[in-house]
Image (cartoon, rainbow, N blue to C red):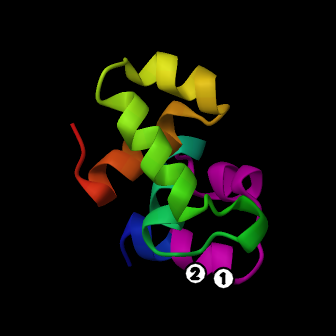
């Protein structure tokens, strides 16, 4: 079983990022990437499509650090949005 598959399985079983990190010895960024990429985020954590569009528009003329600060999201989240939506 790959790391990705293990992360997905553990998240589906309700394990926290910290528990997965400890068990699999991987970073929270890796866990977040696979969690978001595979649609395993809760609605409370999901970013609205209109906000994603605003983030992408801002990011076209700003750095990822500036964008993260302005929209109060992690750089990892922004990278995932950029990869999934293909901006810049």
Q: Is residue 27 visible?
A: no
Residue 83 or 58: which is nearer the viewer? 58
On residue 9, the disc is: 2
Label 2: state its secondary structure: helix
The circle drawn on residue 12 is 1
Q: In the rendered view of the protein, which quadrant contains the C terminus?
A: top left
Q: Judge whether residue 43 is colored magenta.
A: no
Q: Could one spot residue 78 in this view of the protein?
A: yes
Q: Magenta stretch?
A: 7-27
The residue at the point 42 percent across, 65 percent down is 3
Q: Quadrant of the N terminus?
A: bottom left
Q: Are marks 1 and 2 in contact (CB under 8 Å)?
A: yes
The image quarter containing residue 11 is bottom right
Give the CA separation, mark 1 to mark 2: 5 Å
Relative side of 32 to 62, left or right: right
Residue at 37% of width from left, 38% of height from top? 57
Magenta residues, dominant SS class: helix
């Amino acid at each position: 079983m790959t790391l990705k598959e293990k992360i997905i399985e553990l998240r589906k079983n309700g394990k926290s990022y910290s528990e997965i990190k400890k068990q699999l010895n991987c970073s929270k960024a890796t866990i977040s990437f696979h969690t978001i990429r595979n649609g395993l985020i809760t609605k409370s954590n999901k970013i609205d499509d209109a906000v994603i569009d605003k983030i992408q528009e801002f990011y076209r003329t700003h750095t990822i650090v500036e964008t993260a600060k302005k929209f109060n999201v992690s750089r990892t989240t922004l990278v995932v949005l950029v990869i999934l939506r293909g901006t810049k």
